[in-house]
Amino acid sequence: MTVTESVLVIAGMFIVTFGVRFVLFARAHKVVMPVFLDRALKFVPVAVLTSIIAPMIFVSNHQLNTSFNNPWLLGAFAAFLVGLWKQQQLLTIVVGVVVFFVAKYVFS
Amino acid sequence: MSTFKEMRRGAVVSVPMIVGGIPFGLLFGSLASSYGLSPWFAIAMSSIVFAGSAQFVAIGLISIHAPLWVIVSTTFIVNLRHLLYAADMVKYVKHLPMKLRIIMGFGLIDETYAAVRPLYGMGVVDEKTGHKAYLGSFLSFYVMWNITTVLGVVSGELIPGMSDWGLEFAMVATFISIITPYLKTMPFWFAMISAGVASVVLVDLPNNLGLLVSAVIAVSVGYFSDAALNKNKPPMAESSVGGQS
């Protein structure tokens, strides 16, 4: 790549990335969120975070992997149960990570 | 509480995801140099664009000599989910000075949204302190991402095979710890289950489109089940979310 091409790629990527993140913040003091939208947006954390991690948990090498020797599934399941039961963030993370690495060690 | 303490709070809640992000940063740097890209290019991308998954997609496209418009429009699609985060954060930034909003917009990544957004819901931070926690989280990710990019560029993967260790699982566990406190009413369960099913079914769509589509499906499922179940009641209060301090 020439220097010009490199600069164009970085500039273009910066513009669209920053643009998507900033456009609503720029108008934040003027934006009035309709009630229905505010009611919908409270589902964003659960919706997006689940959509990011579910394929990491259930899919390996383009295949659905729900077997009991899938460390991702075991670790996630353990974290999920602890999270529902105790609602303590650090405990949830630690239990999930420990189960994951033990399972990874045992099954590999 | 002092600015420093609030920033530290934001950094502390980000620690598990920072650990999980280290192999990605190293991998990005080493991949960029293995594609024959200049070290300065990789470093510029991490410091100026600052968009984890989009950066991987972009250098992949560059390595196959994709044209500029393909790289830029793909980046746009990969990052479109951040519009949802921004829409959700509008109520917490609207009173802040523009300079601050520019920095917060620049730093609006999955991890910082995931780490800091629940603090508002739980009442740990409010409109006066939340942006400080946000900046603490953003800065710690920014520093980690740029240092690991440089290390990856300079020395390849520092420890061979590190990306196979599964350190990313720290991110999975953290996200689960963020999701579970929401699961007190049925609409949030419906949203989670539909997101899980849709994202797995759509996983092979290109450019993170599966993620985007499944997020939109899950938000709609949550919204419509909420509307159907609570026809005569006012919208659920946010304070029903989170039970810890």
Image (tube, rainbow, N blue to C red):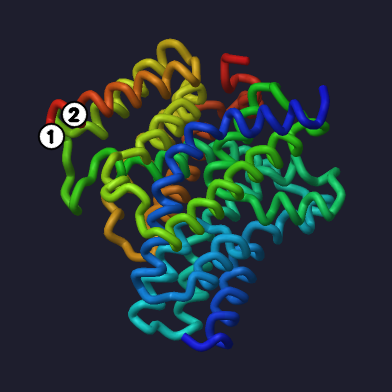
Q: Is residue A61 left or right of residue A23?
A: left
Dot 2 amino acid type: Tyr
- Which of the pair B217/A107 is nearer the observer? A107
What residue is rendered at 37% in x and 51% in y? B158
- Which of the pair B90/A103 is nearer the observer? A103
- Please check whether the numbered discs 2 and 1 fall on a single chain: yes
Element assignment for label 2: helix
What residue is rendered at 39% in x and 64% in y? B207
Q: Is residue B108 left or right of residue B66?
A: right
Residue identified by numbered label 1: A108
Dot 1 amino acid type: Ser
What residue is rendered at 75% in x and 36% in y? B132
What residue is rendered at 65% in x and 41% in y? A38
Pointer 1 local density, CA inside 10 Å: few below 14, some 14–19, many at least 20: few
Task: Give the CA distance from mark 2 to mark 1.
Answer: 6 Å
Residue that lies at the very extreme toward the top in this rendered image: A86
Height in image: B123 above or below B159? above
Residue B28: % across, % down: 42, 59
Q: CB under 8 Å between callouts 2 and 1?
A: yes
Residue identified by numbered label 2: A105
